[in-house]
Image (cartoon, rainbow, N blue to C red):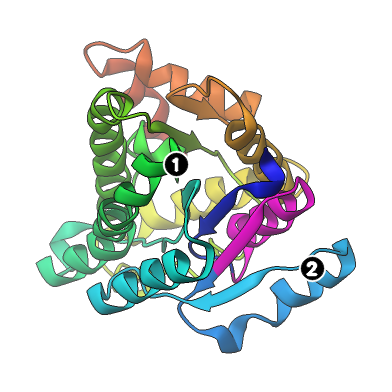
Amino acid sequence: MVTQSILLITGTSSGIGLASAVAAARAGFTVVATMRDLNRADALRDAADTAGVSLDLQPLDVTDPASVAACLSYVKATYGRLDALLNNAGAGHLGTIELESVDDVRAVMEVNFFGVVAMTKAALPLLRASGGRVVSVSSVGGVVGQPFNEAYCAAKFAVEGFMESLTPVAATVGVRVTVIEPGAVTTEFVANVGGRRSVEGTPYDGALRAYLERTAAAFDPAAAQTPEGVADVIVEVLTSENPPARVQTSEAAQRFAGVKLADLDGAHVQAVTRHWVTGA
């Protein structure tokens, strides 16, 4: 039963992670809500209080092996089980490779990809024991490469490939795996994206401005999905008897992902994204 299920969520200080922690607790899960800095937990506490639910807030840095190990040890010692892992922690990044260091790209991969790998590896023994599931928040950017998102999309493509490959293997030991693909969501994620200044004043500046103009419209609250809307989809996946391997969280995300899935030679994707940087 859901009321006996233990759910660990990464990256719950804001956005999709915050909304998912509250929605899952309302659905009956015991939620271990984690974030790198518990000093940023006020928004989550307020949301939980408003919803009338309780959460177990714990520190976790998915890029720190000791922190990952300590968090899973805490879950095992406190609850004796883990029924689901929601890999949500991540960070956006804008830039282009001529203007960045390889270390910049590695840093993006570390949090968005290797953090997912580390958490999944650490959680699998408990999930095998419970017949649980791994749910990972990717992005339509894990399906369609997008201008100035080279490192971020590379990390999300890696998540998609990792999870798609893991899915049939995990199923042999009773663990279900699902990738969640949101499109534009009205969160603080875009506002916190790093790397933008590295492009300003360079030969790529005009293309960046065109991209940012297009993106601002896509993330306008009138057009974008809410974090709560994404959270509802995630809870549906967490409670489904037979969850799919891949879920887009909105009709817009389905249409966008469909561009790639029906595009064997890549021409359609390039036709769609080319005007994002030319403004034409």
Left or right: where 132 falls relative to 185: left
Q: Residue at x 36, y 38 (%)?
A: 142
Q: Earlier in the sequence, mark 1 or mark 2?
A: 2
Q: Position of residue 205 (x, y in %)?
A: 34, 62
Q: Residue at x 88, y 68 (%)?
A: 50
In this view, 259 is above or below 11: above
Residue 131 occupies quadrant: top left
Left or right: where 210 falls relative to 72: right
Secondary structure beneath label 2: helix
Question: Residue type at mark 1?
Answer: Ser
Q: Depth check: 224 or 64 in front?
A: 64
Let me know if residue 79 is in the magenta part. no
In this view, 175 is above or below 98: above
Q: Which residue in the structure is indicated by mark 1?
A: 130
Let me know if residue 25 is in the magenta part. yes
Secondary structure beneath label 1: helix
Question: Residue type at mark 2?
Answer: Ala
Q: Depth check: 84 or 141 in front?
A: 84
The magenta-colored residue range is 13-33
Q: Residue at x 38, y 43 (%)?
A: 129
Residue neighbourhood size for the residue with mark 2, other residues' Cα within 10 Å, grouped as few (<14), some (14–19), many (≥20): some
Q: Depth check: 212 or 182 in front?
A: 182
